[in-house]
Amino acid sequence: MTTIRNTSRLVLWTMTGLLLFSPVMAQKKKKKKATESAAVETPLPTPPQTIVTEPTPPSVEYSHIELPKQVMFCGKEIDLTRFDRRERIDREILSMTFMHSTSLLMLKRANRYFPVVAPILKQHDIPEDFLYLMVIESNLNPKARSAVGAAGLWQFMPGTAKDFGLEVNTEVDERLDVRKSTDAACRYLKQAYQRFGNWESVAASYNAGQARISQFMSNQNENSALDLHMTEETTRYIYRIIATKILFTNPKAFGFKLRRTDFYAPIESTAVEVNGEVSDWAAFAQRQGITYAMLRLLNPWIISSSLTNKQGKTYQVAIPTDAWMHYDPTKMPIYSSAWVAE
């Protein structure tokens, strides 16, 4: 009985405690939920935003220039997107880019010889782009001689030179005369144009000969050298001319940054006529107030110490003026403003 009674009391106390405790716990839970709800609903203060700017990547300098999609040659647009043409021009541009000493020297010399040669081309109605054929023929060295015997800025062979009126013997070699050899080259180019009717084939014929280009055209049923299968040398020849034009049009793109004073100035001279014998060119030079070395430098067509001149031919001997004997940067004319980085 005692156990039952005690158990009844325990149950009663427990139920009473629950009844008393439940409202308190419910109230606490309600407050807790309200607090949690308030914590969720109340937005936190927004911290000040810091704008992070990504660093600008430096501009990329690529190894060589971007290849053009087309180029004008002698007034004709040449498409360079065809894969074979693109790769051929790429090869020649790479050569121009990384043969630094040769490319720079050609640019420097061009400032001396282009002003002499360009007007002669114009007189003969030859496109100015043939300046670049002259460049690749000789690197603009008027004394250049090849292993096979070609000489001068235009690299005439002795037989061809004589065919076009140039004197070549043991005393005189007019292939080395800038003006006379240019005049002869113009007559050759005009003759080739009458045969082919397009200038790119004329350029190819200057390397391979007119007869060979005609044979290639006949065998392959094509009328432009750009579409012919030719020897590697002749095929490269045309693209070397085009690449040279691209270089000379914008040398800065190739990484060549030249000052005005880096170029070679045209040499102003007076002409002394010689229509008889000259027994000693060194003595002749001294009478003109210059050295024999200077005489030969300005007149590379003189290839002997004397001149017999049995036929009484008249020669124009260039004698430099005093004003141009010494380097003067204040008087440096520039053939093309595109060549100067200043």
Image: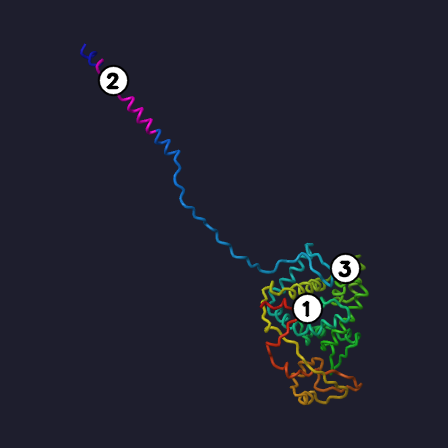
Q: Residue at x 62, y 70 (%)?
A: 102
- CA–CA distance in space, label 2 to label 1: 116 Å
- The correct choice, above or below, for 274 with respect to 55 in the image is below
- The correct choice, above or below, for 127 with respect to 84 in the image is below
Label 2 element class: helix
Label 3 element class: loop
- The correct choice, above or below, for 116 with respect to 218 in the image is below
Mark 3 touches mark 2? (CB < 8 Å): no
Task: Specify the quadrant of the image occupied by residue 168.
Answer: bottom right
Mark 3 closeness class: few <14, some 14–19, many ≥20 residues within 10 Å? some
Q: Amino acid at mark 1?
A: Ile
Principal secondary structure, stretch drawn in magenta: helix
**Residue under label 3:** 224
Give the number of the disc on residue 291: none
Name the mark nearer the viewer: 2 or 1.
Answer: 2
Q: Residue at x 72, y 64 (%)?
A: 234
- CA–CA distance in space, label 3 to label 2: 115 Å
Count of numbered circles on the image:
3
Mark 1 closeness class: few <14, some 14–19, many ≥20 residues within 10 Å? some
| Span shown in magenta | 8-32
Give the number of the disc on residue 16: 2
Name the mark nearer the viewer: 3 or 2.
Answer: 2
- If you read the primary sequence from the N terminus, does the residue marked by circle 3 or circle 1 appear first? 1
**Residue under label 1:** 136
31 falls in the magenta region = yes
